[in-house]
Amino acid sequence: MNSLPVRKMRTVAGKTWPWFLFAGVVVLWAYSLLRADFVFGRKAGENLASFLVEMASVLPPMFLLVGLFEIWVPRKVIERYAGLRSGMRAVPWMILLATVQAGPLYVAFPVAIGLWRKGCAPRNVFIYLGAFSAMKVPMLTFEVAFLGWRFSLARTLISIPLFVALAVAMERLLPSNFRPPALKEPSNRGDGLGSSSLEEGSF
Amino acid sequence: MISLWIITGVALLVSLAADRRKTQAAAFKGLKMFVGVIPILLGVLAAVSLVLTAVTPRMLEGILSGTGLLPFFSALGVGSIALIPGFIAYPLAALLRQNGASVPVLAAFITSLMMVGVLTLPLEARYFGWRAALLRNGLALCGAVVVAAGMAWVLR
């Protein structure tokens, strides 16, 4: 089953599918230029374009900030405020960090990994992700405008204890020695965990 | 959006003034991480735009309004798979409510939309591994049920 050629093929498939999908949408969009009645292709292309604009407007500064964070913020600071012994004091910090940011959830992943690398407890990393997805200030104003403050307030107040509880559950359910694959990437010097072969095969 | 660029710009300038070399290292590090996720990000966004195009607001109205458990579970399913930006999702939710979608259905839809991302799983797994990514999304889906139940109870 897992002979070398098969594994190699799986790795190749794992690396090329995003390009095929992307090219597929571009082809659909190009075809809609030729045939005006092909609305699906035009709309798919427009949707993709709007997502690309969103990505280009949020991700570069986000990654620059993560880079600056990794170089400048001392590990001790993160360990003190959000480390394994920080307890529930870390919750407001994680919520504050999450709510001032903008964008879809995938923007938060590199920040979460950066926090993890600096000694943030897994629980707090997942509290950050929970807060990022469930309660962002810019989005709240939107929610209030369209669904009313009763709906918005109730949803937020129910969500806070919930994502904290889910984060604690995540920490318990993951093995105690769990480390995300992104931490093992060779890009971070000084971590010394070496090869990323484990990650390569996981797609 | 603009504030993010301003904050980043200021941070970059302060960092440059403090230490040129460290700033270069930081920028290089950030850039490398960005370039590393671009392929998978393009694939995920392409998949999302296909789904978003195939599923129209009118279809959602049909599926999510009405009573009983079917709209509720459909809301969870659609919310988990779709990745709709907030500025589209909230007007859509308001429209659904006008057309008779109940509070629990709306709460399930909004919560799963924000906390569960089936289409972004490959991206999440690249950072956290498949195990943690699946676990987080599974728990978040259960969380959406809890939020919906809580909303139904609070806003009776």
Image: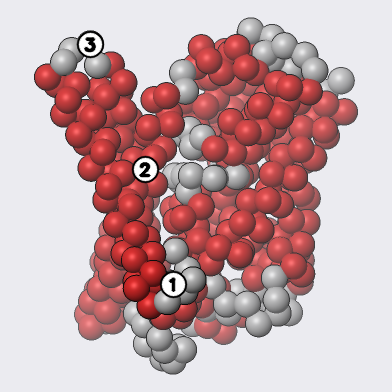
Q: Is residue A189 left or right of residue A41?
A: right
Q: Is residue B59 left or right of residue A3?
A: right
Return the x and y of residue A160 as percentages of the image width and height.
Answer: 73, 48
Residue depicted at x 76% and y 69%? A172
Separation (CA) of disc 2 from disc 1:
23 Å
Is residue A153 shown to the viewer in this render?
no
Q: Secondary structure at mark 1?
A: loop
- Amino acid marked by disc 1: Gly
Return the disc, 3 or 1, that comes first in the chain's sequence: 3
Q: Quadrant of the C terminus of chain B?
A: top right
- Amino acid marked by disc 2: Leu
Separation (CA) of disc 3 from disc 1:
43 Å
To the question of a shared chain for discs 2 and 3, the answer is: no
Q: Chain of mark 3?
A: A
Please identify the quarter of the rendering in which residue B21 is found: bottom left
Return the x and y of residue A81 as percentages of the image width and height.
Answer: 64, 73
Q: Which mark is residue A37?
A: 3
- Amino acid marked by disc 3: Asp
